[in-house]
Image (cartoon, helix red, strand yellow):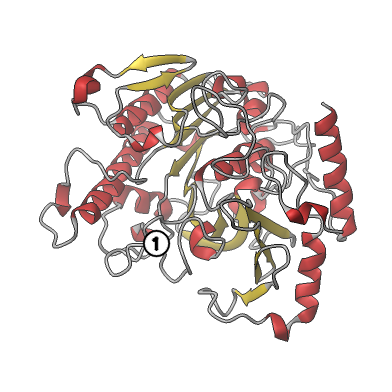
Amino acid sequence: MGHQLNRRHFMQTAAAAVGLPAIGAIAADVTDRAEERPNIIFIMADDLGYADLGCYGQKRIQTPNIDRLAAEGTRFTQCYAGASVCAPSRCVLMTGLHTGHTTIRGNKGQNAPSHDGEANRVPLRSDDVTVATLLKQAGYVTGITGKWGLGEPGSTGLPNDHGFDEWFGYLNQSHAADYYTDYLWRNKERKTIEGNLNGQRAVYSADLFSEFSLDFIRKNQANPFFLYLATTIPHKNFEVPDLGPYADKPWPEEAKAFAAMVTRMDTHVGMILALLKELDLDRKTMVFFTSDNGSAEGWEGTFDSCGPLRDTKYSLYEGGIRCPMIVRWPGKVPAGATSDAVWYFADVLPTVAKLTNAKVPVPVDGIDVTAALLGTAKETPERFLYWEVPQGDSKPLRQAVRWRNWKAVRHGSDDELELFDLGTDIGESKNVAAQHPDVTKRIRDFLKTARIPSPYWPASVDERT
C-alpha cells in the first residue's frame, strides 16, 4: 500500500510540475446520467497493422464485418496503443496508467520471480486496479477470452484476481503463438484441448475464443456485461485452418495465411454483431475494435500494413503505436463518421467508468474521452501522451511523447530529441527539433517527470533531475 501511495503522490506532483491538471482528474459525479448503462465489448487484435482493414485503406484483405462496424460507428484515425509490444500495451489498457507508471513496462523485466518456469514475466500486483475491477464493482458481469499476458500461473496477475468473473485462454504470450495448443486456462484450471493432443490439429484456438464470446453474451444478455475479447489473430505463427479466398493468390505462403487469419477474425466479429442484433442488444452495447500495437511484419509491397506510418511493432514511431480504433454504439456514437481526436489506451478505463457510473479509486494517466466518442467534441483536451521501451539488451531507455501535433522520440536519456510535426509529416520523415527549441524544451520538462523508477525496469533516466 505504501508503494501505491508514493506513486499517487508522485503522479500528482509531477503533473503540477509541468503545469497540467492533476492526473486522474476524472468526472466522478455521473449519477445524473439518464441513459441506460451500455454493455461493453472490447475486441483487440494482436499485431494488426493500422492499414490492415478495408476501412483504413486495405485493398487485398477482406474485412467486410469490421468495415460495417466502422460504417455503423466512428473510425478514429489518431488513436494509440499503450505500448509498441504486447504485455505493456495490455497493462495500460487494463489500468489506465501509461508505461512510465505501469507495473508492466515490457514483455520481460529484470530480477522478477519465476512462475510456472517463466522467468522475468512481471505480473500485475495484487493492488493494481483494472477496468474489470471497476465494472464488477459497478454491477457488471465480466468476462475475458484470448490472450492475457499480465500474469503467469501462481502469480498475483491472474484475470480472476483482477475483476474478471470468467476467463478462458492463454496466460503466457509465447504460448499464445500456438494456435493448435493442447491446453488453455479456464479460470484457474488448466484445461486439455483433446482434439490437439499428440500433435493433432483439430481445434483452432481463436475459434474457441469466438465461441466463448458468443456464449458469454447469450448467458448474460439480461445483465450489464463487459466482454474483453483479446484474440490472438493475426500474431505469428501464421497458422489457420484454411486459406479461404487467398489460397490461389501469388503471394508467399505466410502472407496468404496472414490474410486468411485477418478475414477469419472478421468473421468472428460478424458473428458477435449478428448475435447482438438477434438478442436485441444492438442499441444497448458499445463495441470497441482495435489492435494491441502496430504490425509486426509490415508486409511492404503486399499489404502495406502500416500505411503511411513509419516503422513497425517494437518501435515508438507511429507504425509501432498508432492503431486502428473503431467504436460503435447505435444511436449514441455517430455512424459513418471519422474522427481525428487524439487518445490512447490509458483513456479507456476512465472513459468506460464514466459511461457505466463506475468509480475510479486511484489516480490514472488517462482521461475521460466520452465526448470524443459520442461526437460532441472534435478534440480531446490538450495533454502529453507518453510511451517508453525499457532499457535492456544493451539498448537504453527509449521514450516518445505526443503533444498537440508534435511527436518527440528519444533513443536514450542522453540523446537529443527528434521532433516531428504530425500535422504535415505523418511519416515522421523530417526532424524539426532545431527549428522549434521552445517545443523541445516543453517536452524535455515533461520527460523529467514522466516516469517513476521500477525495480524490474531500471533506467539511468531515473536519476535525472
In x, y percent, where is residue 302?
27, 65
Name the amino acid type tagged 1.
Ala
Q: Secondary structure at mark 1?
A: loop
Q: Residue at x 65, y 71 (%)?
A: 405
Q: Say left or right for 178 vs 348.
A: left
Q: Provide the residue designation for mark 1.
A: 51
Numbered disc total: 1
Q: Quadrant of the C terminus?
A: bottom right
Could you tell whether 324 is left or right of 11 in the image? left
Residue 89 is left or right of residue 302, and the answer is right
Location of residue 106 in the rendering, given as x and y in whole percent from the top left corner: 58, 45
Q: Residue furthest top?
A: 189
Residue 340 pos. (x, y %): 57, 64
Q: In the displayed structure, would residue 441 be above or below residue 111?
A: below
Q: Which residue shows up at 42% across the image and 36% down it?
A: 174
* Residue at the image position 61 percent from the left and 23 percent from the top: 163
